[in-house]
């Protein structure tokens, strides 16, 4: 089973972001992956520090981003699109939401639970519902960036049967430097899951880069530099199954 990650640097305008994202999706679709994953806040120009409120981000980016994801998903109907994240509104609340698409249809969405200070400051709210989607290839779960630090969120996702956890992330200028992917590697090893970490980078901070992490170690990762990159990896589901059986994970 093949997954592709579109690791992206931030850009200054929504039009530029969406144009480059579509270019990258078209390029990676030629490799015929089963899943294409985008980063956290991929369509927010310059990332969220530029905005005074979540409402401002929602009004500028929500509809164009949803229309874009529907369009590219329709163009490549056999590929699941893990649509990074966007700011979604429900009544007076705003959420950092990851959407999952196939054949132009929105299948599921997941709201980030463990918010960072920058999100709280602009009025993003957290939510508490785990997400695992059963596909013809495997069961996939979603966590968003700092959710990986929430042991309850991780445990809920694993207990629902996730074999792959997609993890859209974003690296601000203040993102801490981290050597490797220690927490993701620990979770992958202890829980018997692949973690597909896909980054939206604004700085060269270690920790925001994209990587595919197996229970037996990091399979592949991009460089730390803030530049676009495409990472496509074949995941050995048979090997994962054998690993999980040793952990007695059903």
Image (spheres, grey):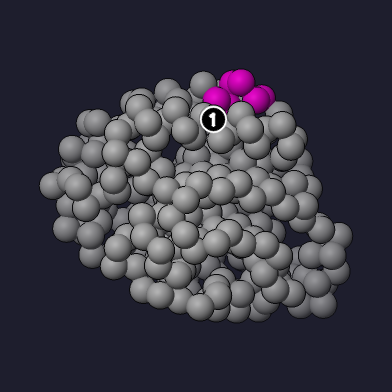
Quarter occupied by the C terminus? bottom right
Is residue 194 among the parts visible in the rendering?
no
Residue 172 location in percent, x, y? 32, 60
Q: Position of residue 160 (x, y in %)?
A: 62, 59
Q: Which residue is situated farthest in the left direction here? A: 52
User: In the rendered view, does 215 fall on the left or right side of 153?
Assistant: right
- When asked about the image quadrant of residue 54, the answer is top left
Membership of 73 in magenta stretch? yes
Q: 130 or 230, which is in the foreground?
A: 230
Q: Residue at x 67, y 62 (%)?
A: 220
Relative to 144, residue 87 above or below: above
192 or 84, nearer to the observer: 84
Q: Residue at x 55, y 62 (%)?
A: 223
Identify the secondary structure beneath mark 1.
helix
- Magenta stretch: give its range: 72-77
Residue drawn at (61%, 74%) of the image = 185
Residue 124 vs 150, above or below: the answer is above
**Residue 189 appears in view:** yes
Q: Residues within 10 Å of mark 1 (few under 14, many from 20)?
A: few
Magenta stretch: helix, strand or loop mostly: helix
Residue 186 located left or right of residue 56: right
Judging depth in this view, the residue of 133 and 79 nearest the camera is: 79
Image spot of residue 135 (x, y percent):
70, 42
Which of the 4 quarters of the picture holds residue 174?
bottom left
Q: Is residue 156 a member of the stretch shown in magenta?
A: no
Q: Residue at x 47, y 51 (%)?
A: 227
Please name the residue that numbered disc 1 is placed on: 23
């Amino acid at each position: 089973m093949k997954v592709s990650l579109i690791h992206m640097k931030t850009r200054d305008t929504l039009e530029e972001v969406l144009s480059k994202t579509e270019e990258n999706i078209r390029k990676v679709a030629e490799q015929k992956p089963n899943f294409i994953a985008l980063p956290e806040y991929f369509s927010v120009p310059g990332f969220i520090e530029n905005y005074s409120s979540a409402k401002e981000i929602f009004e500028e980016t929500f509809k164009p981003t949803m229309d874009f994801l529907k369009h590219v998903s329709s163009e490549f109907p056999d590929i699941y699109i893990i649509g990074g994240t966007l700011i979604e509104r429900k009544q007076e609340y705003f959420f950092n939401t990851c959407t999952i698409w196939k054949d132009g249809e929105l299948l599921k969405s997941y709201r980030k639970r463990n918010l960072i200070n920058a999100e709280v400051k602009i009025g993003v709210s957290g939510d508490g519902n785990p997400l695992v989607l059963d596909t013809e290839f495997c069961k996939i779960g979603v966590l968003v960036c700092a959710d990986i630090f929430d042991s309850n969120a991780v445990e809920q996702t694993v207990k629902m049967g996730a074999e792959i956890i997609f993890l859209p992330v974003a690296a601000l200028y203040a993102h801490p430097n981290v050597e490797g992917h220690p927490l993701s590697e620990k979770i992958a090893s202890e829980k018997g899951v692949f973690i597909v970490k896909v980054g939206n980078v604004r700085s060269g901070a270690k920790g925001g880069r994209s990587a595919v992490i197996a229970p037996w170690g990091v399979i592949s990762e991009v460089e730390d530099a803030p530049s676009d990159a495409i990472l496509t990896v074949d995941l050995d589901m048979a090997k994962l199954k054998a690993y999980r059986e040793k952990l007695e994970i059903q």
